[in-house]
Image (cartoon, grey):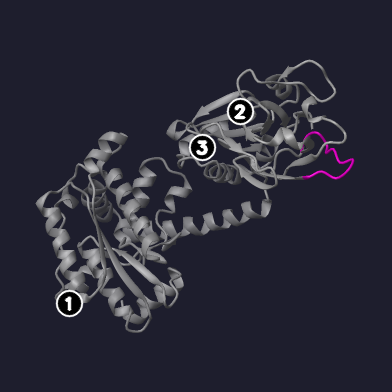
Amino acid sequence: MTADEFCLRLSKDCGVAPGSHVLLALSGGADSVALFCLLLQARKSMPLALSCAHVEHGIRGEASLSDLAFVRALCEEKGVPLYTAHVDAPAYARSHGCGLEDAARTLRYEFLNRTADEIGADAIALAHHAGDQAETVLLHAMRGSDVRGLCAMRMRSGRLIRPLLDCRPEALRACLDAIGQPFCEDATNADRTYARNRVRHDVLPQMERAVPGVGAALCRLARAAQRDEDYFDGQIDALNLRILPLVDGAAMEKNALLALHPALLSRVLVRLSARAGLAPQSAETIGRILEALAREDAAVNLTGGAHAVIGRRYLCLIRADAPYPDVPLRVLGVTDTPFGRFEVRPAQPGEWGDGKTAQSIPGRRLMDARVGSRREGETMVPFGKRSPVKLKKLMIDAGVERAMRRSVPVVRGDGEALLAVGLRSAEGCRGDEDEERMLVRFLGLWPDGSLDGKS
């Protein structure tokens, strides 16, 4: 690959503009050293700021420290800033119940992203090549992925760039040999304990012998899958589907989902999962949600302890670790809460609000006002009534599904529930006609008929 071809790939395929700051993940292996040399060459015709990052994972002892010394010397020779970190991947794997590869990857990406933030890097360059891409496609297919998994890696994903994704590893090593540039060899790359190494050294070579060119074909499959996924993303954007934010996840109306073609529906569920703040869900898990969606009062366990709850009207994806919110309400101005925005301003004469999304309340009752979820056993005396009613009953009567009740915001003042948004205001909001009053108004998505199970 010539310097001009590499610069074109950086700008066209990786979206790196002239003057960008690129942080390279430099392990010291052949691939990352080749990318290092190409980026140095690119700087001669394309203005770029280049920095490097290296993570010592605490796995290979002295060999790992030797790689760090090599990388440090290489960066010093070329005058490139280097940022390093020592992590304990084995300890992380034990404490988080994951594999050593996953632990090392997680810690490495955490350091790369943190370093990029600190130094203001526009892109993080990774040295994945065509061989890595073919292995990834095959691994995902073997694990039962859908088309999303066949997309494998992209030239650019967020600020991660992979300029070598179309390059064969043999060609990269040949370039290094041609210029006499040494690199490190990681002995763990031959360890068949790891699934990727078994695919690299055993499975793919056998496939190549059976069907020559299979590695290149797998890379073409990834590009085709990416093209199709980009198309589906555009189709989903055009649908303008309404996703309700919950304080512990996200929800969508079942009817809107069931009206979609299954090819779109599965991808909408992936987007809903991301919007709910969940870990990525497998194709198998998405399939279980699809099967349960036509039922009522069903539940599906999700990755990371989360769960999908299918009610009469809504599909709710709920995180397992979300706390019950409790936020102070500004007496004058706008307050951002996990439920959405609230505005508090002086009420105009005769302005009472609708009793659901807005309510006029005596100012004295809002001195220590807060917004939170319903508390266990909490009651309210509805406006115009004399007897208290449990908020839970108000929600049930209004058709608020169980999984969504936590997301109904309750405004409290003087230790009393004054407004359950979308449901009722309290008799305590009445006050005296001549006292100062404030209008509390909810500006979020709740409610607009979405809480009313009868609408």
User: Residue 203, how many percent across, how many down?
Assistant: 25, 48
Q: Quadrant where the N terminus lies?
A: bottom left
Q: Which residue is mark 1?
A: 178
Q: Quadrant where the C terminus lies?
A: top right
Q: Does dot 3 land on a helix, a strand or a loop?
A: helix
Q: Does dot 2 land on a helix, a strand or a loop?
A: helix
Mark 2 or 3, closer to the camera: 2
Residue at horizontal 86%, vertical 41%? 351
Measure the alpha-carbon separation of dots 1 and 3: 49 Å
Note whether residue 57 is visible.
yes
Q: Which residue is mark 2?
A: 403
Front residue of 329 and 158:
329
> Residue 351 colored magenta?
yes
Q: Amino acid at mark 3?
A: Ile
Residue at horizontal 35%, vertical 66%? 166
Q: Earlier in the sequence, mark 2 or mark 3?
A: 3
Note whether residue 250 is visible.
no
Which residues lie in the magenta part?
346-357
The answer to whether 269 is drawn above or below residue 50 in the figure is above
Q: Residue 20 occupies which quadrant of the picture?
A: bottom left
Badge 1 local density, few (<14 within 10 Å), some, or many (20+)? few
User: Residue 381, how many percent across, how many down?
Assistant: 76, 21
Label ID, residue 286: 3
User: Residue 389, how many percent across, how many down?
Assistant: 74, 18
Q: Amino acid at mark 2?
A: Ala
Q: Earlier in the sequence, mark 2 or mark 1?
A: 1
